[in-house]
Image (cartoon, rainbow, N blue to C red):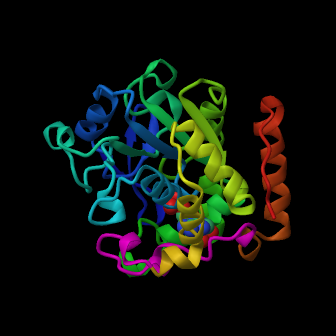
Amino acid sequence: DLQIGEHGYKYRIVDGRVMPPYITPRCYGLSRRIETRPTDICFVSYPKSGTTWLSYIIVLLTGNAGPSLERSFCWLESSWTHPINEDELGSDPKPRLFKSHMPYDMALGGVPHQSPCKYIYIARNPKDVCSSYYYFESNKSWSGFYDGGWDHWLQMFQDGKVHRGDWFHHVLSWWEYRDADNILFLHYEHLKRNTRAELEKIAKFLGLDIPLERMDEIEGSIGFSAMKNTEFSAMKGVKEFGKFFRKGEIGSWKEYFTVAQNDRFDALYQQRVDSSGIDFIFE
Ligand code: A3P
């Protein structure tokens, strides 16, 4: 059921949504069926929204570091990461940390607001998401999935045809449940502008009482350059953080969007986000 779209874009349709080829029915099934525990923490996002950053923060706050960042959590829905079966999961340290890029109705562990697991969703303004995603997927140094140009990518993003589907649906699906006791909804831009307050919010949500000095230490080690220079956060097969990420700033989208593209995107944004009450910082 693997499909190939324009410009070599490989994808798979899972539950009616466009997903990357490595989201296999087996792994996806496992992530849906897993019985979560009250000690579990699942961080969720649309790609390029600050997932890696949030994962590092959670690992540091919970003191749950594995041999590397990506081996400190389970990405169950994906077939190319470790561990991939439930037996291996059982022996993982507590709390078990899970990563997911699924919309609410495809979440890990079933229906989030009825599950014992804690979920932390991070959202980022869609212009930065779209351009960061383009940079990432057209990156030849690690054979990204896309080899077309920006204009076509932007159109695919607006049409909900990139991996993980429609950004608006994804973000709003979680936003709707932001007040559930076991769900924390974060914004990348708030984390960037107001790091300490957001860190404290996350710690409180996780029920952690972190000494002040430790909080200072954590705050000092999660900046973009600090993370870039930490061997711990290097990605599998791609040692350089810089090949995966641009600058970790708000507003890099301006280097990609033309004025006309920006106007069209704004109109779509108004129409789709409309009465939801969600608000983003774009620059
Ligand atoms: P840019 O492409 O704008 O640089 P994800 O982890 O979900 O794939 O998100 C990647 C984006 O998060 C990249 O955005 C990356 O730079 C940014 N990011 C990663 N670590 C960060 C940090 N410590 N501070 C700010 N942004 C960070």
Q: Residue furthest top?
A: 114
Q: Please provide percent x and percent y for residue 197.
A: 70, 52
Q: Is residue 234 above or below residue 169?
A: below
Depth check, front residue: 145 or 122: 122
Left/right placement of residue 40 relative to residue 57 reads left
Left/right placement of residue 268 relative to residue 136 reads right
What is the magenta segment's predominant secondary structure?
loop
Task: Check residue 5 for magenta coloring.
Answer: no
Task: Check residue 236 for magenta coloring.
Answer: yes
Q: Residue furthest left?
A: 87
Q: Is residue 174 above or below residue 99?
A: above
Depth check, front residue: 202 or 148: 202
Depth check, front residue: 87 or 162: 87
Name the residue rendered at 51%, 42% in the picture. 208
Q: Please provide percent x and percent y for residue 183.
A: 56, 31
In which image quadrant can residue 13 be found? Answer: top left
Judged from the image, the quadrant occupied by ligand 1 is bottom right
Left/right placement of residue 268 relative to residue 170 reads right
Whether residue 142 is visible, yes or no, is yes
Which residues, given as a range, are shown in magenta? 230-252
Q: How many marks?
A: 0
Q: Please provide percent x and percent y for residue 42.
A: 43, 40
> On the rendered image, what quadrant is the N terminus found in?
top left
Q: Please provide percent x and percent y for residue 9.
A: 43, 60
Name the residue rendered at 69%, 62% in the picture. 192
Name the residue rendered at 57%, 59% in the picture. 215
Whether residue 159 is visible, yes or no, is no
> On the rendered image, what quadrant is the C terminus found in?
bottom right
